[in-house]
Image: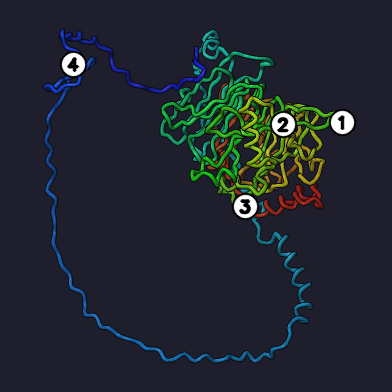
């Protein structure tokens, strides 16, 4: 049976065990401090050491001596005279130009505003259509070998019916992490789980043998690589535990949370690395400037110091009045996304350093969508830790600040735009994608890519107006709002078996890669330039979408 701390599968050389020589017993000798002759300690497993002598002679190195002579050098000195500054006359009288500026300023402002919204020098749609619109499957990865033809063998290969529950790319963009867990369990379970990684930068990649496999004693529901440290990865499990692994160490387990009255008691649905300015001022190492945020279906949002997971440093509860009964309800969290914004699509780390570092969006099991804000200080964290250390029960406040019109069923995914801090999207069991402006309660638009459940929605990290969502019939709908808001620009067939695509993720560092899950397999696709190369007018249209006074229909219909 797998141990609680997990084990790592690695290829190791194990020397053959040999018989130990019989120990020599010298009677009459006691162990005391004394000066004596040299003592030899015979190895208990090596009888003799092999040694050999070898000589090596290098070829003679040819050398050539040469000399050169430079030309004669003349020294010249220059002395300037005392400077005389002359007042140049422009021929224009020194008069007040305020009347002139007041007369031409309205006209100049009008033309500058027209230039700001002009599309004369932007890339045309005809040029954009010439880019590659292809999506090719390049890798099919799984920790289980499906080459067996015997049906009974398939049951033995995956006896616990594990599926790929989550994916994450590391900071280099080459290592893909995959979580193995369960979605078909409604109560407590003793089924194991696993976390696997593949390095796609290697020349030889085994589709059924991950580079690293970490087995856990309960299903792993979500994972997330550190934004800057390529070997640090955090994972949340079905029973509410938080793990942090360092894949560069022999023993990768860096920490594991304990199950207490304060910890999560239900599955962790999201784990996120969040930049903290206060922690950044305390540590010189960049990886220590991040905290781990966990969301659970028990309705708690917890903040963790990933180097010490005995207990969280702070916690919140998603308590808010029900929209119909107005009774205060504890909402189970199902998806979370922080407001991050950067103007540089290539700098993914800079997007984490958002102005509103504590602002995030949460989707719940009841279909509601909330805008939340962290409002705890360093002093409040210290008071929280002191109360927990004394076995006290701290008062958990609610981070909810605003409510949006939600879905008619559980929300499965939310994602904030990396290019505009006021725009985010959500998807859920009602089969719709909703795009919101944080300044408005109602959704700007509603999309229905398929008449099935939707499990995740994500904005492209490189194109501001590209949005994708995974469906319950084994496909990924990719929208390009620069051309159409009603119909997907591409439907990617992931499994072809009408099985749900529970998770997918754009590669935030290598724009050509997209990973998607299908049952216990994850597939890596290579997308064309049409979905990864930004267009000139996209940012302007997205900024108009964030304007509360703009019409979403007019914006989406522009091209």
Q: CA distance from mark 2 to mark 1?
A: 20 Å
* Location of mark 4 (residue): 47
Residue 343 badge: 3
Q: CA distance from mark 4 to mark 3?
A: 67 Å
Where 119 falls versus 132 (above or below)? below
Q: Residue at x 73, y 44 (%)?
A: 484
Mark with earlier residue (4, 3): 4
Say whether disc 2 or disc 1 marks the residue closer to the N-terminus: 1
> 215 left or right of 392?
left
Q: Secondary structure at mark 3?
A: loop
Give the Cα distance between marks 4 and 2.
Answer: 66 Å
Rendering coords of residue 211 (x, y %): 45, 27
Visible in this render: residue 152?
yes
Cα separation, mark 1 vs mark 4, equals 81 Å
Can residue 517 be seen by looking at this rendering? Answer: no
Pointer 1 or 3: first along the chain = 1
Could you say which disc has been placed on residue 396 in the image? 2
The residue under label 1 is 326
Crowding near the residue tagged with mark 3, few <14, some 14–19, many ≥20 C-alpha atoms within 10 Å: few
Image coords of residue 112 (percent x, y): 72, 67
Q: Earlier in the sequence, mark 4 or mark 2?
A: 4
Density class for disc 4 (Cα within 10 Å; few <14, some 14-19, many ≥20) is few
């Amino acid at each position: 049976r797998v141990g609680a701390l997990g084990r790592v599968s690695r290829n190791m050389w194990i020397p053959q065990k040999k018989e130990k020589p019989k120990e020599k017993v010298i009677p009459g000798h006691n162990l005391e401090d004394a000066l004596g002759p040299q003592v030899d300690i015979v190895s208990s497993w090596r009888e003799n050491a092999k040694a050999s002598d070898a000589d090596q002679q290098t070829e003679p190195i040819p050398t050539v001596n040469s000399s050169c002579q430079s030309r004669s050098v003349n020294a010249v000195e220059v002395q300037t005279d005392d400077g005389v500054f002359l007042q140049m006359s422009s021929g224009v009288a020194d008069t007040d130009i305020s009347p002139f500026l007041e007369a031409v300023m309205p006209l100049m402002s009008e033309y500058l505003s027209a230039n700001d919204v002009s599309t004369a020098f932007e890339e045309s749609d005809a040029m954009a259509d010439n880019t590659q619109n292809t999506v090719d499957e390049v890798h099919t990865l799984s920790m289980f070998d499906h080459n067996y033809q015997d049906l009974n063998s398939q049951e033995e290969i995956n006896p616990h019916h594990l599926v790929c529950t989550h994916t994450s790319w590391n900071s280099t963009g080459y290592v893909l992490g995959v979580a193995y867990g369960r979605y078909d369990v409604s109560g407590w379970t003793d089924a194991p789980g696993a976390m696997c990684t593949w390095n796609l930068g290697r020349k030889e990649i085994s589709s059924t043998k991950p580079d690293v496999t970490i087995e856990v004693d309960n299903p792993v529901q979500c994972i997330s690589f550190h934004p800057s440290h390529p070997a640090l990865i955090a994972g949340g499990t079905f029973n509410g535990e938080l793990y942090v692994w360092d894949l560069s160490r022999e023993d990768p387990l860096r920490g594991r949370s304990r199950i207490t009255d304060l910890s999560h008691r239900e599955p962790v649905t999201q784990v996120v690395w969040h930049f903290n300015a206060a922690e950044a001022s305390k540590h010189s190492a960049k990886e220590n400037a991040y905290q781990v945020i966990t969301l659970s279906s028990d309705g708690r949002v917890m903040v963790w110091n990933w180097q010490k997971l005995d207990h969280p440093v702070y916690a919140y509860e998603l308590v808010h009045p029900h929209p119909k009964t107005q009774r205060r309800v504890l909402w189970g969290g199902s998806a979370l996304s922080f407001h991050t914004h950067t103007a540089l699509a290539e700098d993914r780390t800079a997007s984490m350093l958002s102005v509103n570092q504590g602002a995030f969006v949460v989707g719940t099991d009841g279909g509601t969508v909330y805008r939340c804000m962290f409002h705890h200080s360093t002093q409040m964290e210290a008071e929280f830790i002191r109360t927990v250390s004394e076995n006290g029960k701290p008062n958990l406040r609610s981070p909810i600040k605003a409510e949006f019109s939600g879905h008619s069923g559980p929300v499965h995914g939310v994602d904030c735009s990396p290019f505009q801090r006021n725009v985010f999207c959500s998807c859920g069991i009602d089969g719709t994608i909703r795009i919101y402006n944080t300044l408005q309660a109602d959704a700007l638009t509603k999309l229905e890519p398929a008449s099935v459940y939707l499990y995740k929605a994500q904005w492209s990290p490189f194109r501001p107006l590209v949005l994708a969502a995974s469906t319950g019939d084994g496909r990924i709908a990719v929208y390009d709002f620069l051309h159409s808001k009603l119909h997907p620009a591409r439907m990617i067939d992931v499994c072809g078996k009408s099985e749900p695509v529970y998770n997918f993720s754009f590669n935030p560092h290598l724009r050509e890669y997209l990973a998607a899950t299908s049952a216990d397999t994850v597939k890596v696709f290579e997308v064309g330039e049409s979905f990864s190369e930004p267009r000139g007018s996209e940012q302007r249209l997205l900024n108009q979408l964030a304007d509360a006074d703009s019409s979403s229909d007019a914006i989406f219909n522009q091209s």
